[in-house]
């Protein structure tokens, strides 16, 4: 079945550091890939999304590129801020059908001043 | 529209009691999903509705769990004879088809109902 594997956390970075959170997936067909963010005490929010190979999703300075050849969708940000501290989930959803989302286990990011 | 609304936000119940949660999706969304999230894990799919029809139930959804979506609007998730292992955050999401994105759907999650079984 479909699955998502993402790097374990927690990840601790200093403010303005470069961020990479790795994500790889296993799926049949051509899924859509996304990153969700969960800030402390809040619900899940869609951060960015890519629907086909070589697409780049971007939002709030974060970006991720859908790489079919390596089945990856790594999240990057050039300069993190304290306000980026949250849990980040990589996710995939199938094309067609009912679009249920399969999530990774989440990576906690802590940014220190 | 204020997004996906879930009630209650928190529920503490004694083992063996029944509990019911409610989800009000975004009004124009015809698809509604329930997920469960335990501490340190990603959300796990439980069940899905398109309008009032329940189209899939995960194997995670035992016979003690039942979900309904009468008239294709709000949905309820009931857990009968709760067990301590049912303690989790129960998330609801709704979605609609995004125009111009090759069939992709946009998801909106509610803030969840945190269940604690004591």
Image: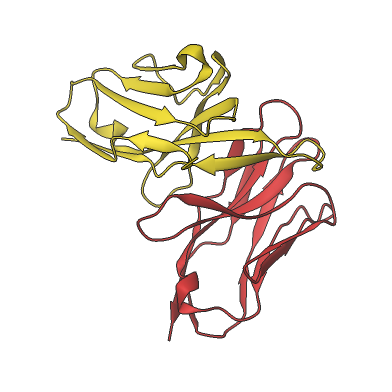
Chain colours: A red, B yellow
In screen coordinates, is A104 left or right of A71? Answer: left
What residue is shown at x 56% (from left), y 49% (from top)?
Answer: A104
The x, y position of residue B35, in whole percent, is 47, 34
> Residue sitting at 79 percent across and 43 percent down?
B101
Q: Does any portion of residue A10 appear in the rendered image?
A: no
Closer to the camera in the image, A79 or A21: A79
- Image side of residue B85 versus residue A101, left or right: left
| A10 versus A31 height, above or below | below
Front position in the image: A3 or B32: B32
In the figure, A78 relative to B34: above or below?
below
Task: For the C terminus of chain B, give its image quadrant.
Answer: top left
Question: Is residue B22 toward the left or the right of residue A58 in the image?
Answer: left
| Above or below, comparing residue B105 to residue B21 in the picture | below
**Residue A106, position as x, y percentages in the image:** 50, 55
State the residue at coordinates (43%, 86%).
A113
Tell me if I can see residue A62 in this picture: yes
Where residue B49 appears, as percent x and y from the top left, is 55, 21
Residue at the far front in the pictured view: B1
Image x and y of residue B103, in percent: 78, 35
- At horizontal 71% and vertical 25% (from top left) the residue drawn is A97
Q: Is residue B72 above or below residue B3?
A: above
């Amino acid at each position: 079945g479909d699955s998502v594997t993402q790097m374990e956390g927690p990840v601790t970075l200093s403010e303005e550091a470069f961020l990479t959170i790795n994500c790889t997936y296993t799926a049949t067909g051509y899924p859509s890939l996304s990153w969700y963010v969960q800030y402390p005490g809040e619900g899940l929010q869609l951060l960015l999304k890519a629907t086909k190979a070589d697409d780049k999703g971007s939002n709030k300075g974060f970006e991720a590129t859908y790489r079919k050849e390596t089945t990856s969708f790594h999240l990057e940000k050039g300069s993190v801020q304290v306000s980026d501290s949250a849990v980040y989930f990589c996710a995939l959803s199938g094309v067609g059908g009912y679009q249920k989302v399969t999530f990774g286990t989440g990576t906690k990011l802590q940014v220190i001043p | 529209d204020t997004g996906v609304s879930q009630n209650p936000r928190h529920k503490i119940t004694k083992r063996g009691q029944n509990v019911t949660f409610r989800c009000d999706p975004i009004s124009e969304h015809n698809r509604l999903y329930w997920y469960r999230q335990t501490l340190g894990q990603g959300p796990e799919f439980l069940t899905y509705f398109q309008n009032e029809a329940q189209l899939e139930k995960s194997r995670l959804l035992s016979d003690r769990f039942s979900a309904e979506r009468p008239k294709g609007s709000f949905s309820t998730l009931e857990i009968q004879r709760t067990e301590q292992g049912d303690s989790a955050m129960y998330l609801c999401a709704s979605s609609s088809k995004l125009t111009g994105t090759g069939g992709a759907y946009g998801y909106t999650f509610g803030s969840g109902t945190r269940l604690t079984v004591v």
